[in-house]
Image (spheres, helix red, strand yellow):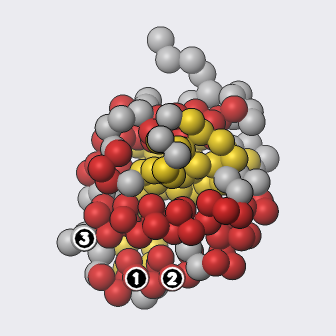
């Protein structure tokens, strides 16, 4: 497996991975129309180009196929992992771990945060396995559906 910065040629594959992953992760947790609208707005060609230009979009390749991606940004004090997404059949193979690590490379001293819809058990277990700890719970709206998210934190301090 190889993780590298995304290019324009990768954007169709990023959308394909997002489609597979979000439908798998949120079936039964979010309304289908919410998942569909989220994918249409967050993974439209224009939205993907904006993500690419921001510089935090990296992809994971497995035998020349894109199987995951991370979209991260650095704020003044925190690295924000907006997405770490892996094609369902490639989960539990180290893809997500490698993607989170590349997001940390820009500034390993900075704490990392990621928000997950409460009830996304696989997402929560994944973050916990990487050393993230649960933080605040926030009620919000996603395309007119009320949801609850939990913010997860990964300290910049070494574990031990």
Name which of mark 1 and mark 3 comes first in the sequence.
Answer: 3
Residue with the most extreme top position: 160
Q: Nearer the viewer, residue 44 or 126?
A: 44
Residue position marked by numbered label 2 in the rendering: 40
- In this rendering, the count of numbered labels is 3
Q: Of helix, strand and loop, which one carries label 3?
A: loop
Q: Is residue 49 above or below residue 63?
A: below
Secondary structure of the residue carrying tag 1 is helix
In contact (CB < 8 Å): disc 1 and disc 2: yes
Residue labelled with disc 3? 27
The quadrant in which residue 105 appears is top right
- Residue at image point 47% right, 41% down: 63
Q: Earlier in the sequence, mark 2 or mark 3?
A: 3
Inspect this view and state whether residue 124 appears: no
Spatial separation of the CA atoms under disc 1 and disc 2: 6 Å
Q: Are marks 2 and 3 in contact (CB under 8 Å)?
A: no
Horizontally, residue 157 falls left or right of residue 85, namely: right
* Above or below, comparing residue 57 to residue 48 in the picture: above
Cβ–Cβ under 8 Å for marks 1 and 3: no
Relative to 84, residue 140 above or below = below
The residue lying at 52 percent from left, 46 percent from top is 64
x and y percentages locating residue 141 in the rendered image? 45, 79
Residue at numbered disc 1: 36
Image coordinates for residue 29, horizontal then vertical, percent: 25, 70
**Mark 1: few/some/many CA within 10 Å (<14, 14-19, 20+):** some
């Amino acid at each position: 497996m190889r993780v590298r910065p995304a290019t324009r040629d990768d954007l169709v594959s990023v959308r394909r991975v997002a489609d597979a992953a979000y439908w798998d992760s949120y079936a039964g947790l979010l309304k289908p129309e919410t998942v569909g609208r989220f994918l249409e707005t967050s993974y439209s060609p224009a939205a993907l180009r904006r993500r690419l230009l921001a510089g935090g979009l990296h992809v994971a390749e497995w035998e020349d196929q894109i199987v995951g991606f991370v979209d991260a940004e650095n704020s003044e004090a925190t690295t924000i992992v907006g997405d770490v997404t892996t094609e369902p059949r490639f989960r539990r193979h180290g893809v997500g771990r490698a993607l989170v690590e590349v997001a940390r490379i820009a500034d390993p001293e900075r704490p990392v945060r990621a928000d997950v819809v409460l009830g996304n058990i696989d997402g929560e277990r994944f973050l916990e396995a990487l050393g993230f700890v649960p933080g605040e719970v926030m009620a919000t709206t996603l395309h007119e559906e009320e949801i609850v998210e939990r913010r997860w934190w990964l300290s910049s301090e070494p574990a031990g």
